[in-house]
Image (tube, helix red, strand yellow):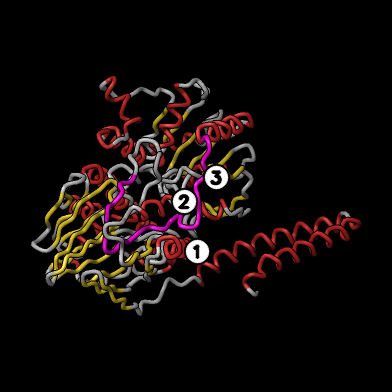
Amino acid sequence: MRLEFLGAAHTVTGSCYLLETGEDRYLIDCGMFQGSKRIRELNYEGFSFNPGDIDGVLLTHAHVDHCGLVPKLVHEGFKGMVYATKSTCDLAQIMLPDSAHIQESDAELQNRKGRRRGDEPIQPLYDLDDAAEALKRFTAVPYNQELKLSEHLSVIFRDAGHILGSALLEVFVHEDGKDTKLVFSGDLGQPNQPIIKDPTYVDGADFVLVESTYGDRLHQIYDKESALLEIINDTMDRGGNLIIPSFAVGRTQTLLYYFYRLSKEGRLDPDIPIILDSPLAIAATRVFLKNFQDFDETSIKPFLTSGKIPTFPQVRICETAEESRALNSSEGSAIILSASGMADAGRILHHLKHNLWRPESTILFVGYQAEGSLGRRLVDGIKRVRVLGEEIAVKAQIKMLDGFSAHADANQIMDWLSHIQSPKPAKIFIVHGEAPAQEALKGRIQKELGIEVYIPFRGDLAKITGRASEIIQSNIPSVSVEKEMEEVLSDFDADYRQLRRKVLQLVIRQPKAMEPVIKVMTKGRNYLRKLFMPFNI
């Protein structure tokens, strides 16, 4: 058996693993790379295998970093089936066409610019026809039932507790007279989150691939509703808008759930408009309501009691681009939820353009922000950003509420792994994370569970026989960080140039200010050197 790590290896996105057993060749996920420009460029590289030779895809869930390259796979010759839970199949019906639309729009924009430079036109990564063809290959699989893929290979989908329809996979391989069980965690969910059931514990496994998004962090345990309400009231008192970049699938529905509870409890001002401005989030919410059979016990009660969807008239829906643009010229304050969750694309960019410079507004992040994303830079405190071609000063309040993540934190990952006992894994592969999180999780697994751990790079290959494995390291170069670092340094340069200009203007107008300004700058320089001491710079 061969297991090749083709994505989400030393990165958070691009989940894709190729499992070869005898004559069987299956992909576990086929996701899109997201984040910095350099990482996104990986989407345009050719597959390292012939798509026509792949028998099928086992899909953990509908986020595009797990399913977003399936249309490209189909375009390049894949003829097999894509197996996923019913809710994942329903969500993919909206996620993949939306992604295809983005690919077409991006290519059209690049070609408009390219024509002026005399460049050759480029093709989109895939188009709507590719997405439609891909969706024909989706086959719904129930939770907790064995699906026999061949004489030597079967799989069981278990609830991963991440988003609606998310699954962790138990894969059973019989080869050369030996049985091997592999477990793919997919995105492991945070227990006790609204709507979604808790992740399923797995009894035993020979090998485990576990995600590590929050492998070095712990979610804060606090009253999320009250913290959310405090930010709402503070922003409304200042007369600004509360802009929430939100992932269309999962986070948006969780926030709507909290808003609904606050409203029913009489704690949320009923005159504050809650505006859902994302066609994808609107469609995803409708899919959620159609698949309430996958809800947890608490969230399903209103449906079982009344037999219909609870009403929430405070929520307004923006279906069209014209309605979305009108929000930026409307008077009064509002709560605006818009995609994307990392603020890299979509209608959220228009809302950021019109609100980032306003001190009375608040930008609230409630989910993971990948390195290189606009959301990550805002959370890290950048003072000027370029949005839709315009440089904007960041004067709005930037807030981050932890604990809303749909990913398990370090303790929750360790708890899930600790239940895998019969048998205990021979080796754990840590995937889907950034280096600090992966190294921290590796240390804990080795110390607390006493299990061998390997953190694969993209292209690494594991040869597995029974419970024995051999790692063949890849010669694929890792994603270059030089360009990413240059982007960060250019932002620092811009801030420095602006500060230099203001300092010179100050001391010219107020010569007496020069001495205290020099003292402040000297302290700042010394503090910066101190911060970099651990890196021996």
Report crowding for label 1: few under 14, some 14 to 19, many 20 or more residues within 10 A (C-alpha).
some
- Residue 202 in magenta stretch: yes
| The one of 318 and 256 positioned closer to us in this rendering | 256
In the picture, the quarter occupied by the N terminus is bottom left
Res 29 → quadrant: bottom left
Of the image marks 2 and 3, the number of the one nearer the N terminus: 2
Q: Is residue 309 above or below residue 22?
A: above
- Return the residue found at the far right: 512
Amino acid found under the numbered disc labelled 1: Pro
Front disc: 1 or 3:
1
Residue named by callout 2: 368
CA gap between label 2 and label 3 equals 10 Å
| The one of 73 and 249 positioned closer to us in this rendering | 249
Res 179 → quadrant: bottom left
Amino acid found under the numbered disc labelled 2: Tyr
Residue named by callout 3: 400
Q: Secondary structure at mark 3?
A: strand
Report crowding for label 2: few under 14, some 14 to 19, many 20 or more residues within 10 A (C-alpha).
many
CA gap between label 2 and label 1 equals 15 Å
